[in-house]
Image: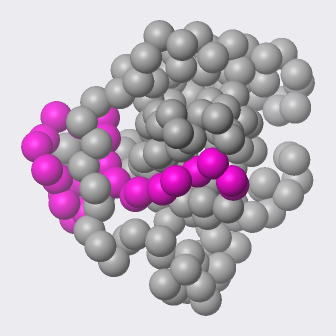
Amino acid sequence: MLQEIAIFAGGCFWCMVHPFDQWEGVISVQSGYTGGHMKDPTYREVCTGETGHTEAVKIIYDVEKISYDQLLDIFWSSIDPTDAEGQFGDRGSSYRPEIFYTNKEQKEKAELSKKLLDQSARFSKPIVVPITPAQEFYRAEEYHQDFYRTNPDHYQNYARASGRIDFINKHR
């Protein structure tokens, strides 16, 4: 088995685990923080916007069963790629969407997928998701891990009330 890591930010990490977690070849999906300047931040610190971090998911996957291109497709289908100021009901830099590449091949694939999505006219506004080098990923507190499984009612209500589910269904 050949494993790689993919890191994506798409707003609330509670809503970013489930889209990836259901695919064969995805070994694990962790909620956490990345893209900031503070070492080992907490949820409360990240939410202030002062640490520079965004909520993100770290995906460990088997490249023989699922490709980075497939993960990119899942990512683009799980967010509003035209909103750089947060996602759905969650606003601010700690909820910004971003692709964090771990190697040159991921960078190239991410840039191509972004370009193709922008050219597709699937969205009426430009695709604004930055593609940046991966930084230190800090695992979020345990109560944030697998939230859609451990708190299914709260998760479903949150995903619906935030506008994420309606948006995704409209733009598939």
As drawn, 161 above or below 77: below
Locate residue 126: give its quadrant.
Answer: top right
Q: Which residues are magenta?
A: 23-46
- In front: 95, or 7? 7
Q: Is residue 29 rendered to the left or right of residue 26?
A: left
Is residue 26 part of the magenta span, yes or no?
A: yes
Q: Is residue 145 rendered to the left or right of residue 2?
A: left
Residue in the image at 78% along x and 55% along y: 167
Q: Residue 166 at what x, y percent from top left? A: 80, 63
Residue in the image at 86% along x and 46% along y: 171
- In front: 42, or 82? 42
Q: Residue 25 at what x, y percent from top left? A: 63, 48
Please identify the residue farthest to the left as the structure is shown.
Answer: 39
Q: Decide if residue 6 is in sight here.
A: no
Is residue 47 part of the magenta span, yes or no?
A: no
As drawn, 154 above or below 90: below
Q: Residue 155 at what x, y percent from top left? A: 57, 78
How many labels sit on residues? 0
Q: Is the image coloured rainbow, by chain, by secondary structure, or in one colour?
A: one colour
Residue in the image at 64% along x and 70% along y: 159
Q: Residue 99 at what x, y percent from top left? A: 50, 31
Residue in the image at 72% along x and 36% along y: 70
Please identify the residue farthest to the front as the structure is shown.
Answer: 1
